[in-house]
Amino acid sequence: MKTITLQHSLIHSGNLILVNAKYPFQGSIQKDTLSPVSKTSPAVFMNSSAVKLLSSLMDKLHGWEQITAVSGWRCMQEQKEIYAASLKENGKKYTEQFVALPGHSEHETGLAIDLALKQEDIDFICPHFPYTGICQVFRQNAAAYGFIQRYPKSKEAVTGIGHEPWHFRYVGIPHADIITERDLTLEEYIAFLRQYPYGKKYCLHKNPNMCISVSYLEASKTSDTQIQIDDSLPYTISGNNVDGFIITQWRKERGNG
């Protein structure tokens, strides 16, 4: 076991940060942590770890032959320009439904991507990504590669954003599987994990080779947070951008060598 000290600012970083109208993005992006999502979309960037998984999925599906990347990482200034342009062109109601406020957009995290079916005309704000063909095949395989459809239909009241079939968010493995299997939004997942306090109770996700445990640790309100963790096992720690950390640990299933 080893003791890790987590600075309070770390609640604002990691693959599981919740960014929405209530919780702004408070982290910072270093350009060297971003990569082009594909050779066919060299101007669309995303978190490099997310790009590796996205590339693996697209290679499996030959996805880039029919799918194109519309928008990935955006700096706040670009988000401001997009928001202002949409207000002018589409009006307030439409903009509030489909464009996040500057400082509150997932695109600013580098963990989100908008995709479209390749066609002659593509709407930048609401690209066409249907529930059929290659787009649906991508959607059905996305969770296994760490991606979720971030703004599903019927969850508008939870996310504060309209139904967006084209917007995908990287949250990592196994979180995408758990979110998808339980039909949760990221807002609901962050709340769901609070019933699994670290060191007392765990949300378990199993596959043929691994048992993965996920738990929540509330951040100290007055100082840095300390955690004792078994460092002989692979683990990750992500802030949730709200009030604490999500700890994920991998253990080999017994009987599998």
Image (spheres, rainbow, N blue to C red):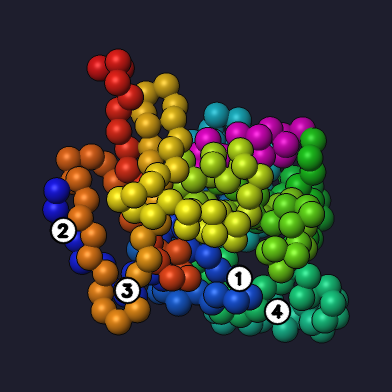
The spot of residue 130 in percent (x, y) is 79, 43
Residue marked by disc 3: 220
Q: CA distance from mark 4 to mark 2?
A: 44 Å
Residue drawn 23% across the image and 60% down it: 227
Q: CA distance from mark 3 to mark 1?
A: 23 Å
**Chain-order first, disc 2 or disc 3:** 2
**Chain-order first, disc 4 or disc 1:** 1
Name the residue type under label 3: Ser
**Chain-order first, disc 1 or disc 2:** 2
Name the residue type under label 1: Asn
Q: CA distance from mark 1 to mark 2?
A: 32 Å
- Kindly state the secondary structure of the residue where label 3 is placed: loop
Segment colored magenta: 133-146
Cβ atoms under marks 3 and 1 closer than 8 Å = no
Q: Is residue 73 covered in magenta?
A: no
Residue 114 picture quarter: bottom right
**Chain-order first, disc 4 or disc 3:** 4
- Kindly state the secondary structure of the residue where label 2 is placed: strand
